[in-house]
Amino acid sequence: LSDICFTSTTIPKMLVNLHAHSKDISYRECLTQVYFFMIFAGLDNFLLTVMAYDRFVAICHPLHYMVIMNPRFCALLVLMSWFIMSLVALVHVLLILRLTFSLETEIPHFSCEVAQILKVARSDTFFNNICLYLSAVLLGVFPVMGILFSYSKIVSSLMRMSSTSAKNKAFSTCGSHLCVVSLFYGTALGVYLSSAVTPSSQSSAIASVMYTVVTP
C-alpha cells in the first residue's frame, strides 16, 4: 500500500504531462504532491527499518518471534511511522508557504521535490535548507543505523550456525530486502547530495526515477 501510494503521488501526473505535452502544475497541486510524497517516501524508509528488525528477530530470536512481533506491536510501529512522517511533511509544507516565487516558475524536475522547490524560490531559504538537511539526517541516518545493527546481529548469528541449508535459507530471506534497501537509500542519498554539490538537475532526476519508480 505504501509503495502504491508513493508512486501514485508522482507517476500519474507525469504520464498526463507526457500525454498532453504540457508540464503545468498549480501551486496547490505542487504543495499537495510535496506533502504526500514526503509522507510515503518516509513511510517506506521506516518500514524498511522495521522489516530489518523483523528479520533480526526471526533469525536471532526465532522462539520469541510471535511474542515480540505481535500484531499490536506491528500496528504501533506503522502508526508511529505514519504520525512522524505526517508531522515532518506538514512542517516542510508550512515552511514552503512562507517563501515567494515568481510567476510561471520552472522546477527542473519531473515532480515537486522540496530540494528542487527551494532552488527556484525568490526569498531566503536558509531556514528551509537547515530543516531539510536536519530531517534528512534524522530520518535517514537513524533508520540506516537500525538496519546496519540488525544485519550485523544477523550475520553474527549466521556465523554460529553449523547447518549450510539454514544459512542459505536465512540469506535468501534477507536478499530481497537488502536489494531494495541498497536501491532506495543509494539513489535517495544521491539525489540530496547531488542537489547540494552541483547545480545540474539531470543526475538527480535520473536518481529520483530509480527510487520513486524502480524500487517500489
Image (cartoon, helix red, strand yellow):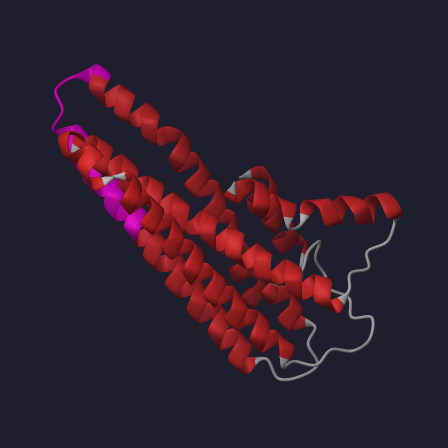
Res. 125 visible in picture: yes
Q: Could you tell me which residue is drawn at 57 percent across and 47 percent down?
A: 6
**Left or right: where does residue 136 sit relative to residue 99?**
left
Hey, which residue is sitting farthest front in the picture? 72
Q: Quadrant of residue 168?
A: top left
Q: How far across and how far down the image is residue 149, in percent?
A: 24, 47
**Left or right: where does residue 29 sit relative to residue 93?**
right
Is residue 1 in the magenta section? no
Q: Quadrant of residue 172?
A: top left
**Left or right: where does residue 46 sit relative to residue 108?**
left
> Compared with residue 132, is residue 201 higher up or lower down, i.e. above or below?
above
Q: How far across and how far down the image is residue 104, in percent?
A: 83, 70
Along the line of sight, the residue nearer the viewer: 31 or 166: 31
Magenta region, mostly helix, strand or loop?
helix
Res. 199 visible in picture: no
Q: Could you tell me which residue is drawn at 21 percent across and 31 percent down?
A: 59
Is residue 160 in the magenta section? yes
Along the line of sight, the residue nearer the viewer: 170 or 12: 12
Q: Could you tell me which residue is drawn at 58 percent across and 55 percent down?
A: 37
> Compared with residue 141, is residue 100 higher up or lower down, i.e. above or below?
below
> Compared with residue 61, is residue 39 higher up or lower down, i.e. above or below?
below
Hey, which residue is sitting farthest bottom in the picture? 124
> Compared with residue 174, is residue 132 higher up or lower down, i.e. above or below?
below
What stretch of residues is rendered in magenta?
146-165
Q: How far across and how far down the image is residue 152, in percent?
A: 22, 42
